[in-house]
């Protein structure tokens, strides 16, 4: 790619746009259901303290590293490594990121499609008068309507493609600047309703009163895993978004803002779910079932539940969309810059490819589906390969690249905007990047494989 083409490259138009888009990539369905589930299974407030420590001490330096690679190169995940480490094997890490983003979008779009189905169900008031068993049966029946899953998945891929098709500034930035504040408002409204329920205090105590005896090795590993995966690290998203950030923006405050936004949303999700769960005597460890089965049952019994149920599933759809936008952008940036395919056609091509793989992920969840291997669905296989192998391995290699290949001078040059910004903790952050973060991610990687 010539210098002229790079200078005419699309990019974020404002600091708020950068934070909204990057926070949107980090904030997804995992914040709404996975974080409360992990917190519920790992000692409540004790897990929360460990998680916050992981995010601050490791998450911010790792995120900063990815943003540094992106902005320093001004290229997509593959092109970045090719430019910064020419004639080496490092571009393979970029290819891993693109592949990871593609695979995650392929199965994540299945779940994202469910949010649209459940918005329709909520509007139809189809949960009314049903107990948990009946709502669970509805969820199972929906899975067994294979092509209905595929229809909603296609609709969600189309929505994602519509935003990415319009470009970085007029698509991704414009829509995330609207969607992220809306997501925050909905969470606050639901949180206020949840804490005003009977016995809501028990849920808040579980969330905010730590029992330090609950901190174990398992809790540490779970907090590490949730922290890294929640912040969208290792899949090329932050490298790609970093390449669209202006040279005058402060990368450190961007990383801090995104991390705080992600953590705030996870906390608000806990405030929505735990008081409601304790109020209605529900054990909040059901993962995906918590979102699609238990929560509708809770709203069913709540004053104003019809309205709040609709709002909740709109929230889930928004959280999913801000994540799928970033996943698709990784693939589109690669196709348009490395293979020189026009952006609009690259978007269409990436969406069609995602749909092709995603159909098998959706249909594999149907009972008796031929797309299951030894009891494991194709959906679960994609999830395992991306979450347990590609994500942590990619994250570790990115960190190693910044710490050992790019080195301290280039890292400092980028985070201080060539010396124009003061960054008092830069040496400590680089120490984490070079030594502590690779070790922490290695632990997650090994643990994820042997679990």
Image (cartoon, grey):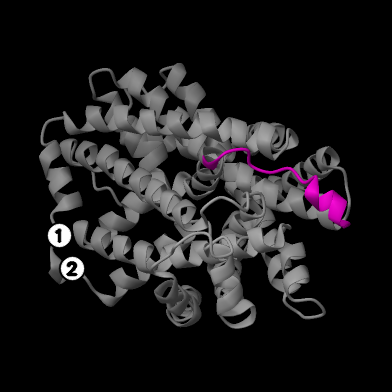
Picture layout, residue 52 above or below residue 429: above
Q: Residue, x 34% and y 23% (percent of image)?
A: 308
Residue extending furthest front? 420
Q: Is residue 343 magenta?
A: no
- Mark 2 crowdedness (10 Å alpha carbons): few <14, some 14-19, many ≥20: some
* Relative image position of residue 444 (x, y in whole percent): 45, 74
Picture layout, residue 207 above or below residue 416: above
Q: Nearer the viewer, residue 376 or 120?
A: 120
Q: Nearer the viewer, residue 407 or 227?
A: 407
Q: Quadrant of residue 370?
A: bottom right
- Label 2: which secondary element: helix
Picture layout, residue 211 above or below residue 164: below
Q: Mark 2 sits on what residue? A: 214
- Considering the whole magenta stretch, tell me its main secondary structure: loop
Q: Which mark is residue 210?
A: 1
Q: Are marks 1 and 2 in contact (CB under 8 Å)?
A: yes
- Label 1: which secondary element: loop
* Relative image position of residue 443 (x, y in whole percent): 44, 79
Q: Which residues are magenta?
A: 1-15
Q: Is residue 203 visible?
A: yes
Q: Nearer the viewer, residue 243 or 137?
A: 243
Q: Quadrant of residue 349?
A: top right
């Amino acid at each position: 790619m010539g210098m002229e083409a790079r200078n005419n490259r699309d990019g974020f138009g404002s600091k708020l746009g950068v934070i909204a888009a990057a926070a949107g990539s980090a904030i997804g369905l995992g914040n709404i259901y996975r974080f409360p589930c992990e917190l519920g299974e790992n000692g409540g407030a004790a897990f929360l303290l460990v998680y916050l420590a992981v995010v601050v001490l490791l998450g911010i330096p790792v995120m900063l590293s990815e943003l540094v690679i992106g902005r320093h190169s001004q290229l997509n995940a593959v092109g970045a490594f090719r430019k910064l480490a020419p004639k080496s094997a490092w571009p393979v890490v970029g290819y891993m990121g693109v592949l990871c983003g593609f695979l995650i979008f392929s199965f994540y779009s299945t779940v994202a499609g469910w949010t649209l189905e459940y918005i329709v169900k909520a509007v139809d008031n189809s949960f009314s008068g049903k107990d948990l068993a009946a709502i669970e049966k509805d969820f199972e029946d929906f899975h067994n309507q294979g092509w209905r899953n595929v229809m909603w998945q296609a609709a969600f891929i189309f929505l994602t493609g519509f935003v990415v098709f319009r470009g970085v500034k007029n698509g991704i930035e414009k829509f995330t600047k609207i969607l992220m504040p809306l997501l925050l408002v909905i969470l606050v409204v639901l949180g206020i309703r949840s804490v005003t329920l009977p016995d809501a205090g028990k849920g808040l105590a579980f969330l905010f009163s730590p029992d330090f005896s609950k901190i174990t090795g398992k809790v540490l590993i779970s907090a590490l895993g949730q922290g890294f995966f929640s912040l969208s690290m290792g899949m090329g998203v932050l490298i790609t978004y970093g390449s669209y950030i202006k040279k005058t923006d402060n990368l450190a405050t961007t990383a801090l803002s995104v991390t705080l936004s992600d953590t705030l949303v996870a906390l608000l999700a806990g405030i929505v779910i735990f008081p409601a769960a304790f109020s209605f005597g529900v054990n909040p460890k059901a993962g995906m079932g918590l979102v699609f089965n238990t929560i509708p049952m809770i709203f069913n019994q709540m004053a104003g539940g019809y309205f709040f149920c609709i709002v909740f599933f709109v929230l889930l759809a928004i959280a999913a969309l801000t994540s799928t936008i970033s996943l698709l952008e990784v693939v589109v940036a690669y196709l348009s810059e490395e293979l020189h395919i026009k952006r609009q056609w690259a978007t269409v091509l990436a969406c069609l490819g995602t749909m092709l793989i995603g159909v098998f992920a959706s249909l594999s969840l149907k009972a008796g589906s031929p797309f299951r291997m030894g009891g494991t669905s194709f959906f679960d296989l994609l999830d395992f390969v991306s979450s347990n192998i590609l994500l942590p391995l990619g994250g570790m290699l990115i960190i190693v690249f910044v710490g050992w290949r790019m080195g301290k001078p280039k890292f400092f040059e980028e985070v201080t905007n060539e010396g124009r910004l003061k960054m008092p903790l830069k040496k400590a952050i680089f120490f984490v990047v070079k030594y502590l973060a690779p070790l922490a991610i290695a632990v997650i990687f090994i643990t994820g494989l042997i679990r």
